[in-house]
Image (spheres, rainbow, N blue to C red):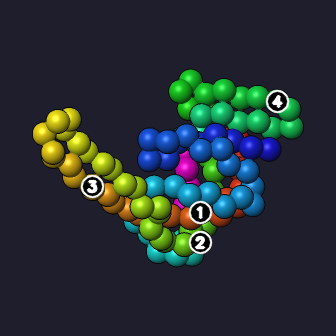
Amino acid sequence: MFAIIESGGRQIKVEEGAVVSVDHINQSVGNEVTFDKVLFLDREGTNIIGDPFVSSANVTGVIDKQERGQKIRVFRKKRRKGWRRTLGHRVDVTRVRITAITAG
């Protein structure tokens, strides 16, 4: 059984027991999180497609870790002017261990 959820404007495929990275969730480690924006649900070969979300379906998980993602480098340049800038940032991410996928 797997599901596709929306979190932070991204679509993430999740299964029970999997650890996924999502955008920062402002809760402490060990707290339980519920994702109610379920776009797609596969239950023993039966596909349930949401319009846009599957009603009465949710995904539950426990926050494992709060950390920082990979560094993103951005290089900007204007041709023939000698102007260049290197910028970058790191995004805060939350690691969530999926415990249950429920469909109503």
Measured in 3D between alpha carbons, the distance from the residue under mark 3 to the one under mark 2, in whole angstroms, is 33 Å
Quadrant position of residue 30:
bottom right
Q: Which residues are magenta?
A: 32-36
Which label's residue is closer to the chain start, 4 or 1? 4
Q: Is residue 62 above or below residue 102?
A: below
First in sequence: mark 2 vs mark 4: 4
Question: Do labels 4 and 1 touch, CB within 8 Å?
Answer: no
Q: Earlier in the sequence, mark 4 or mark 3?
A: 4
Q: Which label was assigned to residue 55?
A: none
Neighbour tally class for label 2: few under 14, some 14-19, many 20 plus, Cα within 10 Å: some
Q: x, y percentage for residue 3?
A: 69, 42
Give the percent coordinates (x, y) of residue 60: 63, 57
Which amino acid, mark 2? Answer: Asp
Seen from the viewer's position, the closer of residues 104 and 58 is 58
- Residues at marks 4 and 3, CA–CA distance in whole angstroms: 49 Å
Secondary structure under the numbered disc 4 in the rendered image: strand
The residue labelled by disc 3 is 86
Q: Is residue 30 above or below residue 7?
A: below
Pair 1/3: label in front:
3
Tell me what residue is drawn at x 71 percent, y 58 percent.
18
Q: Calculate the distance from the C-alpha at mark 2 to the C-alpha at mark 4.
A: 30 Å
| Marked residue nearer the N-terminal end (3 or 2) | 2
Q: Residue at x 23, y 42 (%)?
A: 77
In this figure, which residue is indicated by the disc labeled 4? Answer: 46
Is residue 68 at all visible to an observer of this figure?
Answer: yes
Given this view, does label 3 or label 2 mark the residue nearer the observer?
3
Specify the quadrant that holds the C terminus: top right
Disc on the earlier residue, 1 or 3: 3
Cβ–Cβ below 8 Å for labels 3 and 2?
A: no
